[in-house]
Amino acid sequence: MYLDKAKVQQSFAAASATYDGVAVLQGAVGKVLLATIDNESPTGTLLDLGCGTGFLTLGLLDSARSIIALDIAVPMLKVTQSKLADKDSVSSVCADAEQLPFVKHSVDGVFSNLALQWCINLEVVFADIKRTLRPGGALIFSTFGPQTLQELKTAWAKVDEHSHVNDFYSEQQLQDFLRQAGFEEIKIETRLYQSSYSSVLALMKELKQIGAHNVIEGRNKKITTKTALQCMIAAYEQHQTGEQITATFEVIMVIAR
């Protein structure tokens, strides 16, 4: 999977003002991860990798003494800082998850909610996380799986051969990457979420508002025509019933040590 990292950064920076208002799925998945952390009982310092607007960072304080909130987009971090300005136990770092600025064995746990799918080389990311974790520390994260937005992908395939929807790694691929990085105990759970929208355009608007629109490097550089868009919408709606359209999101949740 190849991503244009500059566009990833720009997309999430632009979405900082609208993210909290539309990131319903992200919040729901994050709460499941928080419950997992309660069961794992980490202590010490926890790294919130790809913290976004910090809407889950505060919840992590119930499980760890201090939090490092890290994100690639400065505007996202500024929102996090404004929310947690009175929390001395939270520090923020603007950095790329693929180039962690931490010394070996410096954190007790790493938490990441629906952020790692925007990394280009997960093998390298997992190896660096393993380096950063203290012995016995856990990586707890969620990411999108390959069935995510399958309806949108199928609809665009009726229009042209260009890539309009991001591809995501499978459960088996993630497990292989984690083992290559040195993780030995790996628990994986996959859930399918169905979200409803008033229209295909409403779905696409939400994806833009959370910064998750297509950022694949090498995608079609031509502007999508109105005719092509209308054809895609017609193809999408052809297999829908009722007044609303649905979109599938495959979420893979992982605990690795």
Image: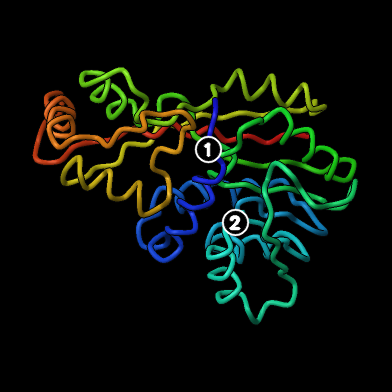
Going by the picture, which residue comes out furthest to the left?
Answer: 243
Task: Indicate the position of residue 78 as horizontal and vertical percent values.
Answer: 57, 70
Cα separation between marks 2 and 1: 20 Å
Task: Indicate the position of residue 237 as horizontal and vertical percent values.
Answer: 13, 30
Q: 245 above or below 77?
A: above
Q: Nearer the viewer, residue 143 or 156?
A: 156
Task: Indicate the position of residue 49 as horizontal and vertical percent values.
Answer: 66, 50
Comparing labels 2 and 1, the label whose residue is closer to the camera: 1
The residue indicated by pointer 2 is 51
Colour mapping: rainbow
- Say which quadrant the C terminus sits in: top right
Q: 81 above or below 15?
A: below
Local packing at callout 1 (Cα closer than 10 Å; few below 14, some 14-19, many 20+) is: some
Look at label 2 and name its amino acid: Cys
Residue 42: image tag = none
Q: Secondary structure at mark 2?
A: loop
The residue indicated by pointer 1 is 4
Residue 169 placement, left or right of 99: left
- Residue at 76% across / 48% down in the picture? 100
Dot placed on the residue nearer the N-terminal end, 2 or 1: 1
Q: Nearer the viewer, residue 191 or 230?
A: 230
Q: Nearer the viewer, residue 154 or 25?
A: 154
Q: Secondary structure at mark 1?
A: loop
Local packing at callout 2 (Cα closer than 10 Å; few below 14, some 14-19, many 20+) is: many
Q: Nearer the viewer, residue 128 or 240?
A: 128
- The quadrant holding residue 117 is top right
- Residue at 83% across / 52% down in the picture? 102
- Residue at 32% across / 36% down in the picture? 194
Residue 161 placement, left or right of 227: right
Residue 96 placement, left or right of 157: right
